[in-house]
Image (cartoon, rainbow, N blue to C red):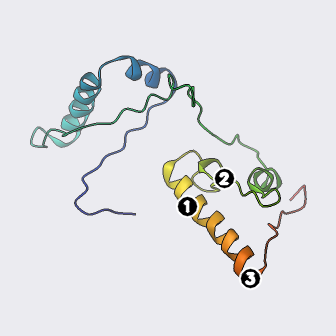
Amino acid sequence: MEYPGANALLVTVTDDESRRIEQQPDSATKAEIMKVLRDMFGNHIPEATDILVPKWWSNRFFKGTFSNWPIGVSRYEFDQIRAQVGRVYFTGEHTSEHYNGYVHGAYLAGIDSANMMINCIKKKMCKFQNLPKGT
């Protein structure tokens, strides 16, 4: 998805590097990012106007969590984690088949869940079809 004129850049760091970055001032993080960008694209690029550094490690609601399906997860297990329970639908980046762990995965999973709910309400197709175990 594109947003012409937005000029936004996303940088993802994990584990020890994300902890290090959280502990320094945002201005130091911005300086690091600008150095990398200038090394890649030259000194003619403009200075970033602002940055947002989420505090995933220190935020009491996240504590560094990041979903990452391990190698070998079966289709059955994947379907189980996103299957509805009664009238409750589960969605989010962890339920995205192709982009789990990423914001666009959450966005696309949300669209999928919304379509499942719409089908349930409008067409009375309310059952999520799980594949049998072992497939």
Q: In the rendering, at what x and y percent does residue 132 appear?
A: 90, 61
Q: Residue at x 33, y 18 (%)?
A: 24
Rounded to the nearest angstrom, the CA distance separating label 2 from label 1 is: 9 Å
As helix, strand or loop, the secondary structure at mark 2 comes to helix
Circle on res. 98? none
Q: Give the numbered dot on residue 123.
A: 3
Judge left or right: residue 50 versus residue 112: left
Residue at figure coordinates x 76%, y 50% from the top left: 81
Dot 3 alpha-carbon crowd within 10 angstroms: few under 14, some 14 to 19, many 20 or more? few
**Pointer 2 residue:** 95
Give the answer, above or below, for where 132 lies relative to 43: below
Q: Quadrant of the C terminus?
A: bottom right
| Picture coordinates of residue 18, whole percent (x, y) | 45, 25
Dot in front, 3 or 2? 3
Q: Give the residue at the far left of this rendering.
A: 44
Compare marks 3 and 2 and give the one earlier in the sequence: 2
